[in-house]
Amino acid sequence: MRCLAVVSAVRLGLTILSYNHVRGLVTRLEARDDADIAELRRIAWGVAAAARFVPGASCLTQALSGHYLLARQGSASKIRIGVRRDTGAELKAHAWLVSGNHIVLGGSIHGFTHLVDHGQ
């Protein structure tokens, strides 16, 4: 239920506020410790499951939500944003949640050009 509440709040925030404002709220918690793999899997599962019930819960919504949930328990992570040029002129952006050497949410980074990391 906590994951559903956080994903819903982040999605609503991204709808009515700017990305920078929501990112500032989500990343304000300081976290220094690495989460163990079981905790990363639990957060990934909870956020992904909750996102199925929240319309428009994009990769960015999920990454921000997972970052917040991990930071609340003191676990460090970062939100990675990248782009990929498809066969046409269109750019596609994607967001991941990364903790240590683990991609928690967002799938493979292969094929994307890294732009920026936000968070710890």
Image (spheres, rainbow, N blue to C red):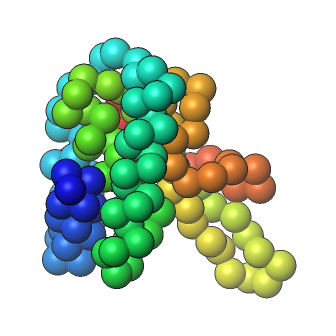
Q: Is residue 99 above or below residue 64?
A: above
Q: Nearer the viewer, residue 40 or 82?
A: 40
The number of numbered badges drawn on the structure is: 0
Q: Position of residue 77 (x, y in %)?
A: 40, 32
Q: Is residue 19 above or below residue 34?
A: below
Q: Residue placed at 40% from the left, 30% from the top?
A: 39
Residue 49 found in image quarter = bottom left
Q: Position of residue 106 (x, y in %)?
A: 55, 54
Q: Residue placed at 69% from the left, 50% from the top?
A: 108
Q: Is residue 113 visible?
A: no
Q: Residue placed at 45% from the left, 34% from the top?
A: 40
Q: Is residue 49 above or below residue 103?
A: below
Q: Position of residue 98 (x, y in %)?
A: 50, 37
Q: Is residue 111 visible?
A: yes
Q: Residue placed at 19% from the left, 73% from the top?
A: 12
Q: Is residue 102 left or right of residue 50?
A: right
Q: Position of residue 95 (x, y in %)?
A: 51, 56
Question: Seen from this angle, which residue lies furthest top?
Answer: 33
Position of the C terminus, as image quadrant, is top left
